[in-house]
Amino acid sequence: MGYDIKDQIVFITGASAGIGQATARQFAAAGCHLILTARRVDRLQILAQELTQKYHIHVHHAAIDVSRLESIESVLNDLPESFTNIDILVNNAGLALGVNKAHENNPEDINTVIDVNVKGVLWLTQAIVPGMVSRQRGHVINISSIAGHEAYPGGSIYCGSKHAVNAITKSTRMDLAGTSVRVTAISPGLVETEFSQVRFRGDAQRASQVYQGYEPLVANDIADAILYAATRPPHVQIADMIIFPTAQASATIVAKKE
């Protein structure tokens, strides 16, 4: 039996698509009120209208660039009063760019991935968690990856960024020991979302090949895991959850049918 999180305030980054969007739907169905953030505010507006009408919850949405501290501060400073006491932070925004060898990486790609995947998590944690500590209630859920546990060729930037997310998650959990704030990492394997299209810069054919020959995970599979972690009793802290499709055994081993 899950812990009731109805009426809790959930802040989600990268909520305009993929895992973030699926997570918003799961928390809405659980009766939570949502702060939806992403760069594509038009998608957020459509999602907010859908969830408000379907679940009769309160939804606030805002454009955010998690790679910029001033953008994060602006969103938080402009929150309506009823949304300021954030109960659950889902650091979901993240991306990969390219599969270059480490010595052939593009400097702009390095900056973009590190700024979004690493600095964004640090800045949002620093901005939101003090309120959780003062209220003695809260949960930080960082979306990591199998790339945070294993490295692979062509993954120096992305794997490095997700190893950093795992280190940040562990350090944060240590820093918050003795408080009532929980800290969780969710580490998916292959999930069919827009992720590969972004990585391959819009090359839809190359992106689709990543998911051919087996049944990959979908965004809702990961959203299920996020909601599970959030709905455990307050004395239960899910530290990390690695989730693969059945055909996947590691970051580089996937059984594909011809």
Image: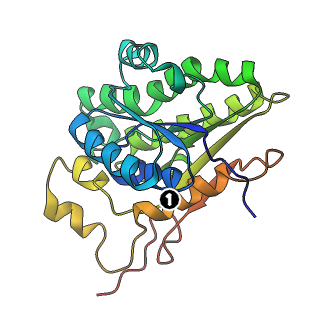
Residue positioned most to the bottom? 258
Lateral position of residue 107 relative to residue 71, left or right: left
Lateral position of residue 27 relative to residue 40, left or right: right
Residue type at mark 1: give it: Ile
Question: For the point 55% across and 22% down, which residue is it?
Answer: 84
Q: Quadrant of residue 36?
A: top left
Q: Quadrant of residue 129?
A: top right
Question: For the point 46% across and 24% down, which residue is it?
Answer: 119
Q: Mark 1 = which residue?
A: 222
Which image quadrant: the N terminus? bottom right
Question: For the point 48% across and 44% down, which residue is it?
Answer: 57
Lateral position of residue 244 relative to residue 204, left or right: right
Q: Position of residue 81 (x, y in %)?
A: 51, 19
Q: Secondary structure at mark 1?
A: helix
Q: Nearer the viewer, residue 146 or 141?
A: 141
Q: What colouring does the structure picture have?
A: rainbow
Which image quadrant: the C terminus? bottom left
Q: Nearer the viewer, residue 202 or 93?
A: 93
Q: Residues within 10 Å of mark 1 (few under 14, many from 20)?
A: many
Residue 217 against residue 14 in the figure, above or below: below
Q: Position of residue 10 (x, y in %)?
A: 54, 38
Instruction: Tell me if I can see residue 16 in this picture.
Output: no
Q: Position of residue 197 (x, y in %)?
A: 22, 53
Q: Position of residue 202 (x, y in %)?
A: 15, 50
Figure disc tally: 1
Instruction: Tell me if I can see residue 127 in this picture.
Output: yes
Q: Nearer the viewer, residue 157 or 35?
A: 35
Residue 82 against residue 73 in the figure, above or below: below
